[in-house]
Every structure is written in structure tokens, then in C-alpha cells.
Amino acid sequence: MALSQALIIGAGVLPLAVAATYFAPKQVYVERSQIINATPAEILALASSNQGYQVFNPYKATDPNLKIDLFGPDSGVGSGFEFNGKEGKGKQTIAAISDNKVVYHIDLGAMGKPTQTIEVEAVAEGTKVTWSMEADMGMNPIARVIGLFMDGMMGKTFTLGLNNLAAATAA
């Protein structure tokens, strides 16, 4: 194949490849659940506190040099922390609390602003804890491609966090 033919084919394929990324979902949702041998109140007490969250923060387990700076009240809406580590930097703030869940707004700067939720439900074995995340990947084609892999990436993080939460409440 001549160089000119390769350039012509490349010039046609590249726009199609970029256009194809817009068929990837704009909205991403990731969820993991686990039964934990603790009461819903015990789980919510940790989840609704900037210090309590650090007890099960999954990123602390994978990044021993993770820098955490707490801000706001010790617990409740407005409680949160800034973080800076090998997986990025940003801010996590408690946005809402109800009888069965805590909602966090995450600010990752240019990387986006996902919302995470820890929801509890009393079950015979203890508490079913569901950790979820919703994110709008926008119109950026690279972000939309990353969104296709978000379940695998964040799912592992949520599972680690749930395991940490189970260990923290087992004592």
C-alpha cells in the first residue's frame, strides 16, 4: 500500500473512531454491596464523619503516603476532607444524610465531580451496605472511553472499602 493510500484511509478512520466514542455512555454508575455484621447506626456513624470515613477509606490501604486534610464539622453535612495521593487529588464532602444513607460530593477538578453514596439496610445477618457512584462523563471522548472501564476500576475500590468497613466494625 502506498503512503498516500494509507494517509487517505487514516484520514477517514480517525474521525469515525472519534465519533464512535460518542456512542459510549455519558452517565456511569458503579455499585457494590456487602453484608456487614454491624448495625446500620454503626455504619452510618462512621460514614457520616470525616474522621470515621478514614477508618475504612480504601485509598489509605493502597497508598501509605496519601495526604488527608479534614475540614468542616467532625460529622454531618459539610464534613469532609481533601486528599492528595498517587491516584489523584481532590475533595470529598458530605452533601446529605438520611436515616439510611450518606451522600458524598467528590471534586476531582478536571477529572470530574462524581457523587458517591453509602446506603444501609438492616438484614437478618447484620446490615447490607451498598456503596455506589454516579458520574457524568460529559462530551469528552477520552472521558467516555474511560467510563467504559469505570466499573472494573471503582468496583475494586468499593469492595476494598467495604472489606475495611467490615473489619473496622468487627472489633
Image (spheres, rainbow, N blue to C red):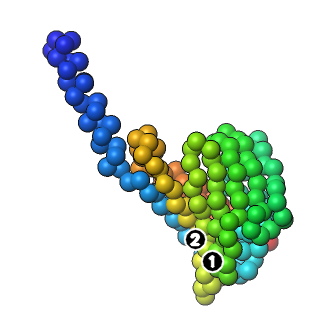
Q: Residue furthest front?
A: 139
Disc marking residue 142 = none
Q: Amino acid at mark 1?
A: Val
The quadrant holding residue 118 is bottom right
Q: Is residue 60 above or below residue 132?
A: above
Q: Which residue is mark 2?
A: 130
Q: Amino acid at mark 2?
A: Thr
Task: Classify residue 45 as left or right of residue 9.
Answer: right
For the question of whether residue 95 can be seen, the reply is yes
Residue 26 is situated, as x and y percent measured from the top left of the image, at 41, 53
Q: Are marks 1 and 2 in contact (CB under 8 Å)?
A: yes
Residue 44 lies in what quarter of the image? bottom right
Tell me how many marks there are: 2
Instruction: Classify mark 1: residues with Cα within 10 Å, few (<14), some (14-19) or many (20+).
Output: many
User: In screen coordinates, is 128 left or right of 4?
Assistant: right
Of labels 1 and 2, earlier in sequence is 1
Q: Quadrant of the N terminus?
A: top left
Asked if one can make out residue 36 in the rendered structure from this viewpoint, the answer is: no
Q: Residue furthest right?
A: 74
Residue at 67% from the left image edge and 70% from the top image edge: 96
Q: Residue at x 71, y 59 (%)?
A: 93
Residue 124 in the image: x percent, y percent?
61, 88
List x then y, in percent, for residue 10: 24, 24
- Label 2's element? strand
* Residue behind mark 1: 120
- Residue at the location (58% across, 60% down)? 115
Pick whichever, 37 or 49, lies toward us: 49
The answer to whether residue 28 is above or below residue 34 is above
Q: Spatial distance from mark 1 to mark 2, Cα to Cα?
A: 6 Å
Q: Position of residue 82 (x, y in %)?
A: 75, 50
